[in-house]
Image (cartoon, rainbow, N blue to C red):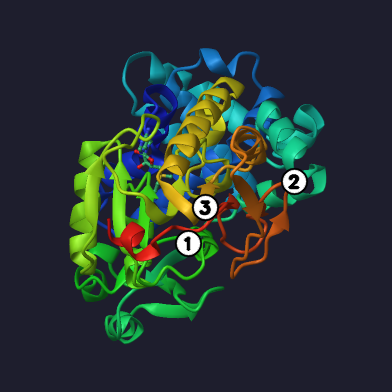
Amino acid sequence: MVLDVLARVATEGAHASVALDRALPTLPRPEDRSFATDVVYGTLRWAPAIDAALGARLRDPDALPARVRAALRAGTYERGVRGTPAHAAVHAWVEAIKRGRGPEAALAGLVNAVLRRVDLDDAERRGGAAAAVALPPALWRHLSAALGPEDAAASARAMLAPAPLWLTVLGDGAVAALEAEGAEVRPGPLPTSKSVRPRRPLAELSAFRDGLVQPQNPSSAAIVGALGDVHDRTVLDVGSGHGVKAAQLAAAGARVIAVEVDARRSEAGRRNLDRLGFEVRHVVADATEPLDGLPLVDAALLDAPCTGTGTLRGHPEIKQRWNDGDVRVAAARQGAMLRRVAERVRPGGRLVYAVCALGREEGEDVVVDFLAGAPDWRAVEVVLALPTRTAEVGARILPSVDGLDGFYVAALERAGVASDPDAAAHS
Ligand SMILES: C[S@@+](CC[C@H](N)C(=O)[O-])C[C@H]1O[C@@H](n2cnc3c(N)ncnc32)[C@H](O)[C@@H]1O
């Protein structure tokens, strides 16, 4: 099962979480499910280092069938990172390949020979600084340019560790309800963020079903704070997705208009907000186009689509797909969205731009470019409840601290005051 999931991620561009969620029910024992989860995510997190180490033993790994390549990667992860004794790790993956179809089974001998000799310590010797922190070379250069080599390395290393399940508490009695069902609940870096080890899948817990909690990384939860006090304000949440930040805004007393281009996601957002008990107006619209149908608002949050380089811990498959071309496409879309969203914010209003990517191109470059063409806007200090590193404009949350995702955030204010703030707020 692990090999099929890894092969699907490699050849079909599947998301690890989606492919794994689909396959896990085929394993009846919880310990097998947690082993498979660790091996899939761990192998993907370590893949660039593993591939460098395998390069010392194989002439052309790319030419191998996807499942064979997956067995070599998973076996190297088990031996080199999990510390499974060589005979056990090698045997299991060789047997899996022997049971494979067609030409695959004939490669069991090669898998055996390579896994007996592979040594993760070869990674740095062959792949240098990038392989030492398990990043592809181009992504290593990209992150080093934005963060400097020291912070880039610390961030990349931190994102090799699994993340806890982070829950944002949105309703009273959430912790008691979680604990009543056997979950271990630890405080997180924000009063509303908890690190949780449930005994059962989250969707089965009453705290989740009753809308008291929402899975969310504390960094993502902290972003909303950059808007300041939103009580009784009308706030656009652009790129609203599943409504996670819309829920926080509504919980803080804002009237929220959630704008999302993908109609299915918007519907999923509506269902999620219903579960959480918040009333939000949903609009399906492309925010790279004029948003003329929307009112002028007091504040806007643009949680823009991005390449996700701050979330490699939870989405390690990004390492294999990331490329400069995608960064350019993302930055162009982010710039277009920022200009359109800014048009809907009233004079004196605030706009927060955020991405869960760490490179300059999707961060300060987008904001500096916007400010150059928008004389009535200025950047203001980003104040968050988590430690940040100041950027040329805006700030970053680095993922080098336990379990946090990385984000870039900028807070912008439009000059002037609304002629009638109440009218603007309620229009
Ligand atoms: C980073 S996710 C936002 C997650 C969401 N804010 C949350 O906290 O649940 C970015 C979202 O932007 C949406 N998006 C992408 N392009 C867009 C566009 N042109 N207009 C509006 N939304 C867009 C994506 O479908 C995705 O749901």
Judging by the rendered image, the residue that carries numbered circle 2 is 392
Q: Image point 34% across, 25% down: which residue?
A: 100
Amino acid under label 3? Val
Q: Ligand 1: does it lie within 8 Å of the C-beta at label 3?
A: no
Residue 409 in the image, given as x and y percentages of width and height = 59, 51
Q: Tell me the distance, in whole angstroms, between the alpha carbons under discs 3 and 2.
A: 16 Å
Foreground: 392 or 277? 392
Callout in the foreground (3, 1)? 3
Nearer to us in this view, 177 or 9: 177
Residue 77 seen by the camera: yes
SS of the residue under disc 2: loop
- Residue underneath mark 3: 352
Tell me whether circle 2 and circle 1 mark residues in contact (CB < 8 Å): no
Quarter of the image with the N terminus is: top left
In the structure shown, which secondary structural element does the residue marked by tag 1 occupy?
helix
Residue at the spot 58% in from the left edge and 35% down from the top edge? 47
The residue carrying mark 1 is: 224
Query: Circle 3 sits in a helix, a strand or a loop, which is it?
Result: strand
* Residue type marked 2: Glu
